Image (cartoon, rainbow, N blue to C red):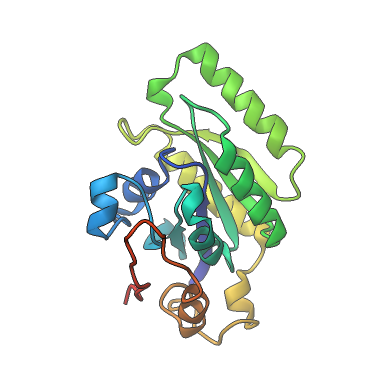
Amino acid sequence: MSRHVVAGTAGHVDHGKTALVKLLTGTDTDRWAEEKRRGITIDLGFALLDLGNGLTASIVDVPGHEDFVRNMVAGATGVDVALMVVAADEGVMPQTVEHLAILEFLGVAAGVVVISKVDLAEPEWLELVQADVAERLGKSAIRWEPAVRFSAETGEGEAAVREALARARARAGAGRWLQGRRCGCFPARCGPACGAWRSMARGATAPSQGFAPRWRSPV
């Protein structure tokens, strides 16, 4: 029988969440013209990731900008595993902290932390950033996998991220969607394609800067 997990990105704006998802899945989750123009994620994005050995993951890519935090909350609701992204050249930033608090409040059990853009950081600075992240997440209620160093430019760390997601899925146990508390989908369909997911995501609010996307089902 196939196994499934729902993973949601988290982290500060421009820390490379969407680039990570694109490298892992081949899907660019920034679909809107306004997202392309501004170079940031505004609405929720979705992608499917094959982790091998019969395990698949539905990836929910969320906005990192503080103005779109309500969209982030809508996307994070119901995820089994958090995929926290922290840029090596900046380190922990305000929305890193905010998103962590949201994930803990929502009761996410397990997570993978990715130190992105490692190609832009000096080795000494990278060590400091990773130590800071480890110290902060060590106090978290979420059970985090050891940090993975990643670069969307070179592909460094791609395999390690996949392996960490599989381990985190095991830590989190069977996905909450598959336990039947939210929907009755078969494992192959549960996630962004299911009606319960869509009902939840309709609660996402549009930003107030003159751009008002309507949430759409990816199927």
Q: Residue at x 41, y 39 (%)?
A: 14
Location of residue 212 (image quadrant) = bottom left
Residue 96 in the image: state x and y as whole percent.
58, 41
The image shows residue 161, relative to residue 33, as above or below, that is: above
**Which of these two is toward me, 176 or 133?**
133
The image shows residue 120, relative to residue 173, as above or below, that is: above
- Give the number of callouts: 0
Residue 75 in the image: state x and y as whole percent.
51, 64
Q: Is residue 172 left or right of residue 195?
A: right
**Which of these two is toward me, 48 or 101?**
101
Residue 115 in the image: state x and y as whole percent.
50, 33
Q: Quadrant of the C terminus?
A: bottom left
Q: Is residue 218 left or right of residue 91?
A: left
Q: Residue at x 55, y 87 (%)?
A: 184
Location of residue 30 (image quadrant) = bottom left
Outermost residue, bottom side? 184
Q: Is residue 102 left or right of residue 162?
A: right
Residue 132 in the image: state x and y as whole percent.
65, 26
Q: Residue at x 53, y 65 (%)?
A: 5
Q: Residue at x 45, y 42 (%)?
A: 13
Q: Is residue 55 left or right of residue 81?
A: left
